[in-house]
């Protein structure tokens, strides 16, 4: 074989290996996987994501890191992940906001059903209406008297339009038939700091964020957003049992990859998510925070996708009827 011919054969061999993908390392390769969180660090969505990142790192044997990208009720982060490379290295951890955004935003710029791969649900967090601990009102009845007297002088904090705290506040104001001034934050972690400092009086937030403050007595609880009392917070009556009939908001969370991520990669990610949420430490931590860990069906990609669809169908007409929207 002459020298040039041999060189040419080697080049063809390298090219063939590249084309056949034999030079592609299997996912995950040697770079970290990023979980994009749509709200500020230290808040409820962030807490779930960080716990997950820790356990997914163990399961995938590759570092999983959390990146906070707050803004516009979570839609900034969703858009970021939608347009990221669909190679499995950029994922979104988002909550119920994924199902309320289509009803709320006139120009959302993405379709939660078709622009993402649905990897599984990871948490279902109840909410509690809390107030600054110096508020005189001892229960919901007294709180209603207080907010009726204060009107727009009462400040209600939330994590921006379309956030769970925003939705819970809207439902609450409509149930008590009294508007308050709403103050948006980048997440409920900074909102909680201001609530304790007295800059705002009220907020409805996931127990994931409130558990420590509730146990320490540094905020006042006025009612849970569930129909049954939350096992981890049995002493706190529900808003429903105190007269706000059927008041219910469950903040479910799921993980998403950009559309077109390969089946092999999404299978590996879903398996890692499943292993993580079934880990005893995850279950113990979530239970302590009042959060329910989804069952096998909800944690599956198909269960997640079906739930998202059902939630979009539930929330869109409610939001449209209420005439709430954002640009
Ligand atoms: N709890 C926030 C919300 O209202 C989100 C967050 O800060 O994680 O949606």
Image (tube, grey):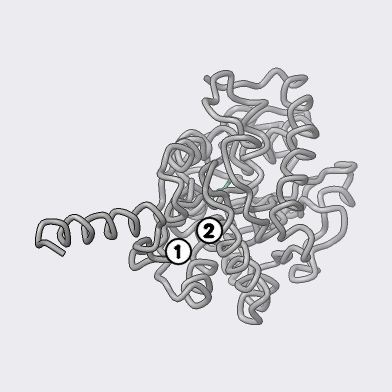
**Cα distance, mark 1 to mark 2?**
6 Å
Q: Residues within 10 Å of mark 2 (few under 14, many from 20)?
A: some
Closest to the observer, 66 or 227: 66
Residue 133: horizontal and vertical position, in percent? 59, 57
Reply above or below: 272 against 79: below
The answer to whether residue 271 is left or right of residue 29 is right
Left or right side of 187 for 130 = right
Is 282 located above or below residue 87 in the figure?
below
Location of mark 1 (residue): 27
Choose between 126 and 46: the one closer to the eye: 46
Q: Quick one: label 1 or label 2, which is nearer the N terminus?
A: 1
Quadrant of the rendering where the N terminus is positioned: bottom left
Above or below residue 68? Residue 296 is: below
Q: Nearer the viewer, residue 212 or 317?
A: 317
Image location of residue 164, percent across then percent down: 63, 43
| Callout 1 touching callout 2 (CB < 8 Å) | yes
Please tell me in which quadrant of the rendered image residue 212 appears: bottom right
At 56% across and 41% down in the image, what residue appears?
158
Is residue 310 rendered to the left or right of residue 102? right
* Residue in the image at 50% along x and 55% along y: 196
Left or right: residue 62 versus residue 259 is left
- From the image, tell me which residue sits under label 2: 265
């Amino acid at each position: 074989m002459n020298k040039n011919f041999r060189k040419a054969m080697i080049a063809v061999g390298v090219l063939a290996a590249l084309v056949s993908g034999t030079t592609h390392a299997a996912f995950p390769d040697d770079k970290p996987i990023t979980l994009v969180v749509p709200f500020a660090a230290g808040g409820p969505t962030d807490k779930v994501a960080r716990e997950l990142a820790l356990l997914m790192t163990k399961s995938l044997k590759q570092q999983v890191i959390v990146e906070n990208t707050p803004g516009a009720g979570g839609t900034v982060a969703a858009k970021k992940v939608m347009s990221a490379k669909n190679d499995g290295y950029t994922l979104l951890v988002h909550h119920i906001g994924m199902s309320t955004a289509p009803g709320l935003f006139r120009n959302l710029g993405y379709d939660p059903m078709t622009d993402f791969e649905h990897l599984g649900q990871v948490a279902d967090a109840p909410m509690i209406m809390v107030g600054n601990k110096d508020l005189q009102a001892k229960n919901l009845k007294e709180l209603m008297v207080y907010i009726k007297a204060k009107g727009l002088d009462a400040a209600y904090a939330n994590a921006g339009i379309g956030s769970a705290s925003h939705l819970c506040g809207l439902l609450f104001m409509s149930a008590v038939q009294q508007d308050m001034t709403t103050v948006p934050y980048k997440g409920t972690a900074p909102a909680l700091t201001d609530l304790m400092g007295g800059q705002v009086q009220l907020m409805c937030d996931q127990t994931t964020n409130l558990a420590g403050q509730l146990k320490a007595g540094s905020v006042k609880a006025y009612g849970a957003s569930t129909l049954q009392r939350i096992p981890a917070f049995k002493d706190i009556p529900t808003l429903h049992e105190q007269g706000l009939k059927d008041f219910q908001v469950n903040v479910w969370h799921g993980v998403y990859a950009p559309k077109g991520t390969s089946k092999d990669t999404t299978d590996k990610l879903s398996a890692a998510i499943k292993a993580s949420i079934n880990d005893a430490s995850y279950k113990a931590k979530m239970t302590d925070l009042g959060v329910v860990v989804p069952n096998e069906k909800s944690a599956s990609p198909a269960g997640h996708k079906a739930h998202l669809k059902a939630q979009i169908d539930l929330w869109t007409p409610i939001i449209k009827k209420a005439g709430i929207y954002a640009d």
